[in-house]
Image (cartoon, helix red, strand yellow):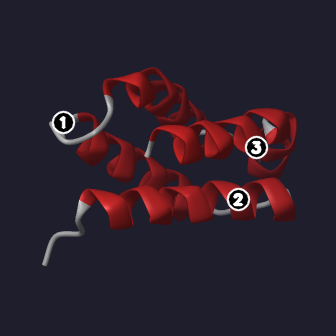
């Protein structure tokens, strides 16, 4: 059963918040971020204002999945992670 956009957005925020708090994560979480963002980007119910933020999050997930040092990648994006979650709260 597919997840609705509200649940997808919540799951995405949870993953990003965990990365921001824990400063660590897994390649599979980054891949999940990519899949969630792809699904949200094609959803016509999503506020257009959030799409640039989703694109940044997609790049983050893609870079993280291919990173040789994922924890450093996450740590270097801590400020972005916090901002993205805040932006998602504002537009969702």
The front one of 12 and 26 is: 12
Q: Secondary structure at mark 1?
A: loop
Outermost residue, front direction?
A: 90
The front one of 11 and 34 is: 11
State the image coordinates of residue 81 (x, y, percent, origin top left).
72, 42
The structure residue drawn at horizontal position 34% and vertical position 51%, both measured from the top left corner, is 35
Residue 25 lies, with reference to residue 82, above or below; the image says: below
Q: Mark 2: give few (<14), some (14-19) or many (20+) Cα within 10 Å.
A: some
Outermost residue, bottom direction?
A: 1
Residue 27 visible within the image: no
From the viewer's perspective, tell me whether residue 15 is left or right of residue 8: right
Q: Disc 1 to disc 2, how far (Cα)?
A: 23 Å
The structure residue drawn at horizontal position 43% and vertical position 46%, both measured from the top left corner, is 92
Q: Mark 1: give few (<14), some (14-19) or many (20+) Cα within 10 Å.
A: few
Evaluate if marks 3 and 1 touch, with contact meaning CB atoms under 8 Å apart.
Answer: no
Evaluate if marks 3 and 2 touch, with contact meaning CB atoms under 8 Å apart.
Answer: no
Q: Disc 3 to disc 1, how far (Cα)?
A: 24 Å
| Residue under label 2 | 17
Residue 36 visible within the image: yes
Q: Secondary structure at mark 3?
A: helix
| Residue under label 3 | 82
Viewport quadrant of the N terminus: bottom left
Q: Secondary structure at mark 2?
A: helix
The structure residue drawn at horizontal position 78% and vertical position 35%, both measured from the top left corner, is 77
Q: Mark 3: give few (<14), some (14-19) or many (20+) Cα within 10 Å.
A: some
From the viewer's perspective, tell me whether residue 57 is left or right of residue 23: left
Res. 5 image quadrant: bottom left
| Residue under label 1 | 42
The structure residue drawn at horizontal position 70% and vertical position 59%, both measured from the top left corner, is 17
Q: In terms of sequence position, does the residue under pointer 1 or pointer 2 come before the other?
A: 2
Evaluate if marks 1 and 2 touch, with contact meaning CB atoms under 8 Å apart.
Answer: no
């Amino acid at each position: 059963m597919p997840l609705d956009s509200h649940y997808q957005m919540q799951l995405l925020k949870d993953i990003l918040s965990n990365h921001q708090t824990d400063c660590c994560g897994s390649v599979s979480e980054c891949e999940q971020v990519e899949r969630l963002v792809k699904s949200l980007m094609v959803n016509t119910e999503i506020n257009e204002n959030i799409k640039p933020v989703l694109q940044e999050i997609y790049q983050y997930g893609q870079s993280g999945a291919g990173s040789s040092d994922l924890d450093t990648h996450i740590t270097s994006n801590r400020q972005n992670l916090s901002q993205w979650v805040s932006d998602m709260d504002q537009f969702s």
